Amino acid sequence: MANSKKKKSGKKGRKNRIFLFFFILVGVIGSLALFLLLRTNHVEKTIFHPMPPAPSPAAKLPEEEKQEKEPRPRPGPRLALIIDDGGYNVDKVKAILEIGRPFTLAVLPNTPHARKVALLAHQGGAEVMLHLPMEPKENNRYSLEPDTVLIGMGTEEIQAILRRGLKEIPHVRGVNNHMGSKATEDPQVMRALMEVLKKEGLYYVDSHTTDHTVGPQIARLAGVACGSNDRFIDPEKDLEAIKKAIRLAMKKAKKEGKGIAIGHPHPLTTRAIREMIPEIEAAGIKLVFASEVVG
C-alpha cells in the first residue's frame, strides 16, 4: 500500500517537473523572440534613411543653375539700313523691298504717297518710321517741307506737328529727322519731341546732320530708346562710292557690334545694296531693323 502511494507521488512529481521545465522553456523562447524583435526594429531605425522628396517640375537642377549663371554668347554684328524720303515714289520703294532683307523705311509726311508707301512697306516686311522734317541751317539753300519743325516754335506747336505726322503714317515704330541740322541742336525742341515719343513708346534715330546734335542726349534723359546714324551711304550718286560707304558702315558694325546707315530710294542705292548682300552676309553681319539696334 505504501509502495503504491510512493509510485503515484513519484509520477505526480515528474509531471510537475516536466510542466515547470516546459513553462520555463516557453518563457525563454518568448523572451528571446521579444529580444530579437526589438533589436530588429532598432537596427531598421538606425540604418533607415528617408529618400529626399522628388524635385518639383519648377525646381532647377544644379546643371541648369550653372548654365543660367554663365553669360550668354553675344550676338553677331548687326547693321540697320534706313531708307529715307519715302513717300514720293512707290516703284522705287518696291525695288528696295524686292531685295528681301530687313529694311527700315522712313516716310515723309505730306508727300503724295506717304500712306500708301507705309502700308506697302509694312506688308512687305519692312519697318516703318516717321521721317520728321526739321529746320536746317542756311534755310535759304533748302526748300522746306510742309509742317517743318522750326526753332522758336512753342512746345504745343512742335508736338502738334509730330502728332499729325504720326496720325498720317500707319505702322510707325520710330522717328528720325529730315534735315534738322539747326533744330536738333536746340534742347527745347528736342525735349518737346521726346515727351511725345516717350508717351507713344517710339524710338528715335538721330540722322546726325550736325556734330552738335543734342538729340541722343535728350532722348536718353527722357527714357526714349535711341540710336545715331553712322553715315549716309549715297551722298554721291556713284555705284562704287555707295559700296565703299556700305563697307565703312560694315566695319563700324563689326567693331562695335551694331551700326546704322542711311540711304535713299535711288536706283543706284538699290543696286549697290543688292550687289553687296553676299559680301555683307559673308562678313557675318546681320541686316536688321532700326528697332533692333537702338537702346
Image: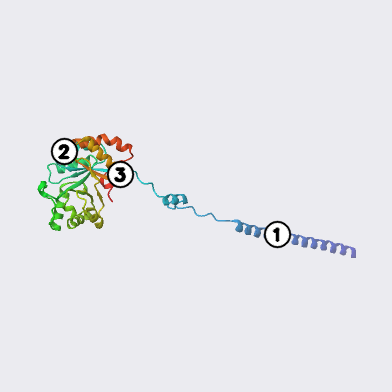
Mark 1, Cα crowd under 10 Å, few <14 / some 14-19 / many 20+, is: few
Q: Spatial distance from mark 1 to mark 3, Cα to Cα?
A: 88 Å
Residue type at mark 3?
Ala
Q: Position of residue 169 (x, y in %)?
A: 17, 46
Q: Is residue 1 visible?
A: no
Closer to the camera, 127 or 54? Answer: 127
Q: Is residue 21 left or right of residue 226?
A: right
Colouring method of the image: rainbow
Q: Position of residue 117 (x, y in %)?
A: 17, 41
Q: Are marks 1 and 3 in contact (CB under 8 Å)?
A: no
Identify the residue under disc 2.
90
Identify the residue under disc 1.
32
Mark 3, Cα crowd under 10 Å, few <14 / some 14-19 / many 20+, is: many
Residue under the image location 25 percent in, 49 percent down: 227
Residue type at mark 2?
Val
Could you say which disc has been placed on residue 253 in the image?
Answer: 3
Which one is closest to the eye, mark 2 or mark 3? 3
Closer to the camera, 67 or 295? Answer: 295
Q: Are marks 2 and 3 in contact (CB under 8 Å)?
A: no
Q: Is residue 128 left or right of residue 13?
A: left
Residue type at mark 1?
Leu
Q: Position of residue 57 (x, y in %)?
A: 43, 51
Element marked by disc 2: helix
Closer to the camera, 230 or 178? Answer: 230
